[in-house]
Amino acid sequence: MSLARTLLLKASDSTWLREHGTRAPFVRRAVSRFMPGETFDDMLGAARAMAGQGVAGVFTRLGENVRDAAEADAVAAHYVEAVARVRTAGLACEPSIKLTQLGLDIDPQFAFDHARRLAQAAREAGNFLWVDMEQSPYVDRTLEVVRRLREEVPGVGVCLQAYLLRTPEDLDDMIERGIGVRLVKGAYKEPPTVAFPLKADVDEQYFRMAQRMLAGPARARSGRAVFGTHDIPLIARIREHASAADVPPDMYEFHMLYGIQREEQFRLAREGARVRVLIAYGPYWFPWYMRRLAERPANVWFVAKNLLVRNLRT
Ligand SMILES: Cc1cc2nc3c(=O)[nH]c(=O)nc-3n(C[C@H](O)[C@H](O)[C@H](O)COP(=O)(O)OP(=O)(O)OC[C@H]3O[C@@H](n4cnc5c(N)ncnc54)[C@H](O)[C@@H]3O)c2cc1C
């Protein structure tokens, strides 16, 4: 792991930086590259614009590790209302939640109850519920909640991280249960005892799991097959494999983050691929933004350059 990535991922956990860094106007301007605004209406506006280009949406209200039960209750209530508003707006936009934002650190049953309420609300609105994957100590608890949700509601999917050594087994289990899978590379700092340190190994494991998700038995289980990546050569490889295996393009999807590889999102949609963009909003964006910077250290130079240019001007 590069030094820049390690430092940025450490910064994502810093309360001091979160409290002070988010006030700096240049940081607020820089983050707008990755999120259209802090409010749900900002998200809706962006989702509407993307829909005009053939790209559907996924939405997430940023926040994690909520340890106050009343705050977790408020997050759940927000999502229930948000799902109703998306339906009224007539947009194809799916919620994606973090279980630690719904109180997983307080009590798994408490988080499950909230997630079940959201999964049911999503189902009633003809929608689907995605569950994000957080740091490795949360994987077992997250998968357990998702398994229990799937027993009650069919429209549920979970994010799996290709950098974790364990993930191929988790993938088999999710496929077996007909749970939707959004496969990503993984965004957190993890030790080599649980995750591949080398990007080449992560990429290879990702592609092997993608093949598994596109294979006949997995498709027959009817969970969704989603590839959450901006890696253009990897996307091309997956599409080539799907085409060679006669998997029609409407059997799988590509999900990307708002503001990253935008032209690629539009190009894939024009070519008939199913594409969604995940749009984040909310005031609690600092750790999430640090992870976006860590994914591509060139982003830090982008922020530093803006800061320098501004200081030279003033
Ligand atoms: C829809 C979606 C949902 C996600 N949900 C989760 C989750 O629940 N849990 C989790 O751990 N991770 C999640 N992630 C993040 C993921 O794990 C990766 O950290 C992230 O997607 C970067 O990896 P990559 O696949 O794009 O490939 P990389 O090999 O990292 O990047 C490929 C190329 O994409 C571009 N790129 C990638 N990231 C950025 C960036 N931040 N800024 C600018 N350009 C960039 C660069 O051109 C880069 O060369 C999610 C990602 C997506 C797209």
Image (cartoon, helix red, strand yellow):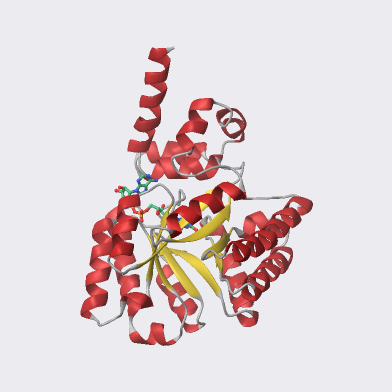
Q: In the image shown, does 11 or 85 lie closer to the viewer?
A: 85
Q: Residue, x 31% and y 79% (percent of image)?
A: 248
Q: Residue, x 72% and y 54% (percent of image)?
A: 72
Q: Determine whether, in the image, residue 52 is placed left or right of residue 269.
A: right
Q: Can you tell which quarter of the image residue 162 is in?
A: bottom left
> What x and y, as percent, mark residue 136?
51, 58
> What x and y, as percent, mark residue 231?
30, 56
Q: In the image shown, does 185 or 284 lie closer to the viewer?
A: 284
Whether 112 is drawn above or below 292: the answer is below
Q: Residue, x 74% and y 64% (percent of image)?
A: 110
Q: Can you tell which quarter of the image residue 287 is in?
A: top right
Q: Determine whether, in the image, residue 53 is placed left or right of residue 19.
A: left
Q: Residue, x 27% and y 66% (percent of image)?
A: 271
Quadrant where the N terminus is found in the figure: top left
Count of marks, rendered view: 0
Q: Determine whether, in the image, residue 90 is placed left or right of residue 266.
A: right
Whether 76 is drawn above or below 175: the answer is above
Q: Can you tell which quarter of the image residue 193 is in?
A: bottom left
Q: Can the viewer see residue 27 in this picture?
A: yes
Q: Can the viewer see residue 104 in this picture?
A: no
> What x and y, as percent, mark residue 36?
50, 44
> What x and y, as percent, mark residue 9?
47, 42
Q: In the image shown, does 14 or 182 lie closer to the viewer?
A: 182
Quadrant where the C terminus is found in the figure: top left
